[in-house]
Amino acid sequence: MNDVMQILALIEISITCSLVLIWGIQKISQQPFPLLAKMALLLVLTNLFFWPLGISLELPLAAYVRGATGDLSIVTTLLLWSTLLSNNKSAPFALKLSIAIIALTFYPFALGLGMIDPYVWGYGSITFLIAVLVFAVICGLSNWSKGVWIIGLAIIAWTVHWHESANLWDYLLDPFLAIWAIFGIFSVVLRRRREKARSGYLFRPG
Amino acid sequence: MSRVIALCFLLLAAVLGYIHIDSRPAWAPFLIQELISPEADDADKLQPENKLSTKLKPPPQAAILNPQLNWLPDTGAVSVHAASLITLKDGSIRAFWFAGSREGAADVVINTAVLDPKTKSWAAPAVVIDRVGAEKGLARYIAKLGNPVPARLADGRLQLFFVTVSIGGWAGSSISTMISDDEGSTWSRPQRLITSPLINLSTLVKSPTVQFTDGRLGLPAYHEWVGRFGEFLRLDGTQVIDKRRMSSGRSAIQPVMFVNAAQDATAYFRQTRRAGHPKQIPVSHTQNAGQSWQAAIDLEIANPNAALAGLTLQNGAHIVVLNNIEVGRHRLVLMISNPKSGQWQVVEVLENDEALPDGQRKEFSYPYLISANGNDAHLVYTWDRKKIRHWYFSSAWLSQAYSQLPTQISNESSAEIKGAQ
């Protein structure tokens, strides 16, 4: 069972690394690839990350990445995969804001500030589970069904012990998701300020 | 329509989540150890009527053996550290320690050796796991290994916890674990314990586990990155199923637990306080089997930011081994406390380089204590980072030392202890 879990985790990391690489290549070449080309590239790169390459490397490339990042949360993984594969519109601003607020509140306490440790709630607090479900329902009511699916899958992954962790937080949130949300907020704020400045220039009385 | 399907899927996830939480085991009380005496040393066995007496009768003079000293076998490694011990089913003692060219080097391996109780000699050492073995087992890059801590599972198997680091120094540590079906000769593939939400960074082990009445283990662990604090992990085999903070802030690591009763335990810590703060042992206390911890008044014994080891004997006496000085690790002592008065007394100075100039003083650190029969004590510690020293204190010697404790420590003798520090 442990062996299967380790293999699945390496496949997950390999796919994620490949998708990030494809996204990077697209950004550099400044043109989106067709889905078929993207899938072919994904297959090649995932194999490259997953299998041991030999040379002087003791492990597959994905294992080195996993050594540094650990297992990404299910929410990060699915959000990343769905966004990079389908070129969907970016996640709602309210979601990024919520994740940023939760992360900025959660991490200081979880890392040792005071005796209250919110990370403990993830082991089996029914109140915490309800809070997560309410968050997912709000996503649904805000017309963002993808969020409902992703959170639902994260909860199910936790119940079947998909990753090494037995803590629901590890399936919902990780530092990379928090960084993405914070950067997302900054980029939206900057863009809005830029747009405002530009519109101010156009309509400035002459 | 897609929203309705998504919400139905969420309902399914909610039901599964509820079932998962509902099936979690309730928090059990601590198991009060009733240790079985091994066949090893008949002379060390106490009579049953003595076991619960608060004050043991002094044994006959002839039976009192002086503490026995020897060294863990040399592996040829330049640097050794962090030894630990466990009693095997046949009464012998198995030691674990890490060894390599230096602490934190890539060539560090975790070694093991067994002490034969009859010949009182250590067998040839063997490698439990090296860095590459850990990498392959854990399916991720590992830069270095450290701190092995063995435990006995309720089903009789041995479990070994050890520290691995992928990036950075010890602050980037995680705990991994393996299980042995053959008393430590061979080990299963290692598995990772997930204990922290930030890339699982910065959880380490140093001290022995405690057992719950449901057979599960409690592992005192600690963080030493953003915060420096103790954490009590509740384990189900190779999985962390709960954890509780034992202290907070940046001042207390490497908790050592003393289980006093089914719900009651005390933890002593290595202090990591800033200059200007008391250099003595921080203490936490639980009265609900580790579900919540409260900081208590410091134990007024000096601590130079160094690990300590502790043990509860069957007569209720607590013993600790520690560096009772505020700076350096050049003095190591064994102390015993009277459970009634709670006063600590130095009963043996194990190492003392105080007379030497600063540059020539050796380091005596990372003590680890176990009892083979509940009344004796085996101690190992790092000797100048070059060797691991092993001491054996027989139950007769310990009970004599205990019987000689003053019932009420006078101000003069308290001052004497402080003077010795």
Image: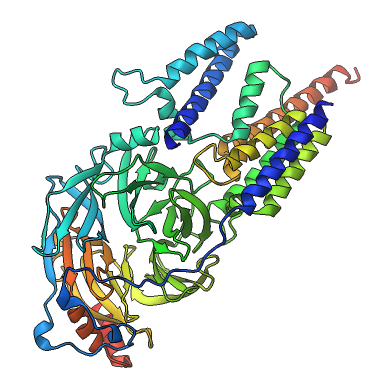
Q: Residue furthest right?
A: A205
Query: Where does residue B247 sit, x and y in percent of width and height?
Result: 49, 64
Task: Say which quadrant the C terminus of chain B sits in.
Answer: bottom left
Query: Where does residue A70 sit, x and y in percent of width and height?
Result: 48, 36
Query: Which residue is at 47% across, 60% downward?
Result: B232
Query: Where does residue B231 sit, x and y in percent of width and height?
Result: 47, 59
Q: How is the image coloured?
A: rainbow
**Visible in this render: residue A33?**
no
Direction from residue A112 to residue B333 in the image, left or right: left
**Visible in this render: residue B171?**
yes
- The answer to whether B96 is drawn above or below residue B270 in the figure is above
Query: Which residue is at 24% across, 64% downward?
Result: B329
Task: Examine the image and state in which quarter residue B338 appears.
Answer: bottom left
Task: Say which quadrant the N terminus of chain B sits in.
Answer: top right
Task: Examine the image and state in which quarter residue B142 appears.
Answer: top left
Choose between B393 and B82: the one closer to the eye: B393
Query: Which residue is at 67% across, 16% downward?
Result: A86
Query: Where does residue B17 sit, x and y in percent of width and height?
Result: 66, 45
Direction from residue A51 to residue A107 in the image, left or right: right
- The answer to whether B187 is drawn above or below residue A26 in the figure is below
- The answer to whether B33 is drawn above or below residue B396 in the figure is above
Q: How many marks?
A: 0
Query: Which residue is at 68% across, 16% downward?
Result: A87
